[in-house]
Image (tube, rainbow, N blue to C red):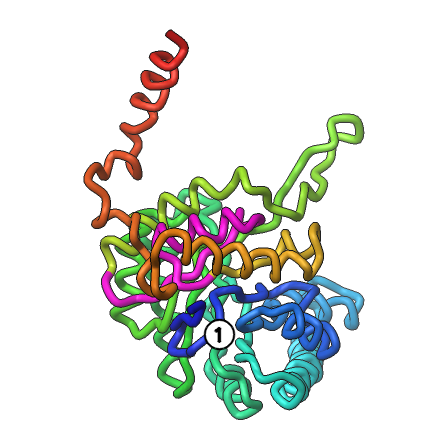
Amino acid sequence: MLKTQYAGLELKNPIIAASSGLTDQVEKIIALEKAGVGAVVLKSLFEEQLAAQSEHLLNSSDSDYPEAYDYLQNIVKAHEVEKYLTLIREARQAVSIPIIASINCYDDGSWESFATDLEKAGANAIELNIQKINPTPEYRPGTIGKLHVEILQKVEAAVKIPVTVKISRNLSNLVSVVDQLRAAGAAGVVLFNRPWQPDIDIHSRRLIAGNPFSTSAELSDTLRWLGIVSGQVNKLPLAASTGVHTPEDLVKVILAGASAAELCSTLYINGEAIVGKMLDFLTGWLKEQGFASLQEAIGALNYKNIPDVAYYERLQFIRQYREAGNSKH
């Protein structure tokens, strides 16, 4: 009843353990499979992480020794990549659920050869987690969306396994970008990645890290864009991420159009037991609502399947307050 199709993979259920510190060791992945997840996205290898390690070894961030920097960068990359490939090989032997490799990139780097290595190591699919914002006036609308497509095309052309893209909610013309990714060969799109959260210490007057975990309060934006995108971009599996914390949250993203949900913060906060609670609740809810399978529920309340699309649009804000005011009288 809970089987779903996502990224060209058949999953026993729609719960995917998202890329995080919970998916960086084989023992943790085995525990997640026992908890009931349908797939695992391995912890990403960060592009900027490789550069930072190279600079640390060189003990210099300047360009006085460019040849030494390049040499060390290649050594660091080879070492870290081999560790990652070993994780894929060992995980594939240890569990039966799909293993999705993750590349976290902020630029159009040389990801093609890395992606080929991931495929050879046994990854069932690759998730491109692209995190880049427009920090300067030089960037024009559409620049970052174009970068997403270009990175996808290069990686997708280099491998035969499915490639998905995890995107930010900050993209301009988000529906158009997702549709371009579909046309470029994306096997799925994840809405959304959650970038590093900055905060300010007003006493020391410096930037600090904010709360690393999402909350259910962040689900509304995910629901809105899941509903709109799934109703406008046909035949592209979507996964929900950010704000999915409770069993009810899982049902909501499915109704909005998600074929799967990537869990991260709730696993840290509530432990692996939340997986079983979500699956039990989902099974009971499907039976209660008369759905014969999960597939029947996916997108039942998306943009094209509701009578009033204003519920997904900004004008609904006015109606919400008007209805709230009327309910008090």
Residue 150 falls in which quadrant of the image?
Answer: bottom left
Left or right of 139, for residue 73: right
Q: Residue furthest top?
A: 329
Residue topped by disc 1: 12
Left or right of 261, for residue 90: right
Q: Nearer the viewer, residue 71 or 193?
A: 193
Position of residue 240 relative to residue 222, above or below, is below
The question of residue 241 being in magenta is answered with: yes
Residue 104 falls in which quadrant of the image?
Answer: bottom right
Position of residue 76 relative to residue 232, above or below, is below
Q: Position of residue 125 (x, y in %)?
A: 47, 79
Position of residue 128 relative to residue 198, above or below, is below
Position of residue 194 relative to residue 160, above or below, is above
Q: Nearer the viewer, residue 321 or 69?
A: 321
Q: Looking at the image, which residue is at 61% across and 61% down?
A: 275
Q: Looking at the image, which residue is at 23% across and 63% down?
A: 234
Q: Nearer the viewer, residue 172 or 328?
A: 328
Dot 1 falls on a residue whose secondary structure is loop
Left or right of 302, for residue 43: right
Q: Residues within 10 Å of mark 1 (few under 14, many from 20)?
A: some
Q: Looking at the image, which residue is at 48% across and 56% down?
A: 284
- The answer to whether residue 67 is visible is no
What is the span of residues highlighted in magenta in the rendered image?
A: 234-260
Quadrant containing the N terminus is: bottom left
Q: Position of residue 134 (x, y in %)?
A: 44, 48
Quadrant containing the C terminus is: top left
Q: What's the residue type where badge 1 is placed?
A: Lys
Q: Looking at the image, which residue is at 73% across and 69% down?
A: 53
Q: Position of residue 60 (x, y in %)?
A: 76, 65
